[in-house]
Image (cartoon, grey):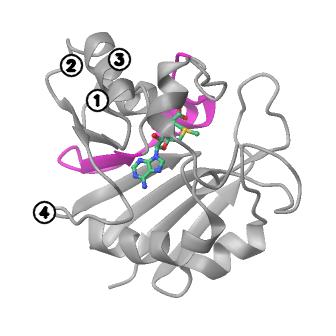
Amino acid sequence: MTKETDWQERYHTEDTPWDKGKPAPGLVDWLKTQTLDPETRVLVPGCGRGHDASAWANAGFETTGLDLADLALTDARKKYDSLPNLAFFPGNFLDEKPQEPYDLIFEHTLYCAIDPDRREDYARSLLNWLKPGGYFLAIHFIFPLDEDGPPFGASREEIINRFDPELKLIEDWKPRNFDGRKNEEWMFLWQRIS
Ligand SMILES: C[S@@+](CC[C@H](N)C(=O)[O-])C[C@H]1O[C@@H](n2cnc3c(N)ncnc32)[C@H](O)[C@@H]1O
């Protein structure tokens, strides 16, 4: 994968090895024990075919999936059409701003998919999309930046330094993974300070 990934083309050619056809196990586990306000509005940027977004909607939350790739969103809408509290919109998380920021942002393998030169843009954008006091829940890939991977590595320390101090780390842990992803994923729960 090059720095300039053509996401629409990846979906067009079905070259989507990250897509396991169901929500991330770490998210499924977290949703079983969450104590969020039922009115929490959730954004899932880089939602792909919408499996994680569907887990949020099935848990009862008003959920929006956002992605650059129209083809992914077409598949997402087809598969999850029956969920009335779930909507999918095309958009660029790094360059756009919402009319109304969200109470919670969940992301899974978006940070590792964007060019590392744009990580500061990602951190800035997060503050555009997330309300003060809101939560940021993420499943990131942890592996060295100079190794090939899915596609850009990061360390736990780099991620923590990226979002601190605007966000306060509540906890981080190794989530249950999809088969074959052992020891690569790490989950973080943050709260935006102000
Ligand atoms: C590795 S895939 C992960 C998809 C999904 N989260 C999953 O786990 O199945 C990364 C996704 O992010 C989307 N994406 C990449 N850059 C984006 C951006 N700046 N804004 C919105 N979506 C983006 C891609 O189109 C792709 O669907």
Q: Nearer the viewer, residue 20 or 94?
A: 94
Q: Position of residue 165 (x, y in %)?
A: 52, 88
Residue 191 lies in the magenta stretch: no
Image depth: mark 3 or mark 4 in front: 3
Q: Residue at x 89, y 54 (%)?
A: 147
**Mark 3 falls on what kind of element?**
helix
Tell me which segment is drawn in magenta: 21-45
Q: Is 110 rendered above or below residue 6?
A: below
Q: Residue at x 26, y 64 (%)?
A: 96
The first of marks 3 and 1 along the sequence is 1
Q: Residues within 10 Å of mark 4 (few under 14, many from 20)?
A: few
**Mark 1 falls on what kind of element?**
helix
Task: Evaluate whether residue 133 shows in this view.
Answer: yes
Quarter occupied by residue 181: top right
Q: Confirm or deny contact between disc 1 and disc 2 (CB under 8 A).
A: yes
User: Residue tagged by mark 4?
Assistant: 100
Which quadrant does the N terminus fall into?
Answer: top right
Which quadrant does the C terminus fall into?
Answer: bottom left
In the orientation shown, which residue stands out farthest toward the left? 99
**Mark 2 falls on what kind of element?**
loop
Q: Confirm or deny contact between disc 4 and disc 2 (CB under 8 A).
A: no
User: Residue tagged by mark 2?
Assistant: 83
User: Residue tagged by mark 3?
Assistant: 75
**Mark 4 falls on what kind of element?**
loop
Q: What amino acid is at disc 4?
A: Glu
Q: Confirm or deny contact between disc 2 and disc 3 (CB under 8 A).
A: no
Q: What amino acid is at disc 3?
A: Asp
Question: Label 3 to label 1, Cα distance in Å?
Answer: 17 Å
Residue 36 lies in the magenta stretch: yes
Question: Label 4 to label 2, Cα distance in Å?
Answer: 22 Å
Q: Which numbered dot is residue 57? A: 1
Q: What amino acid is at disc 2?
A: Leu
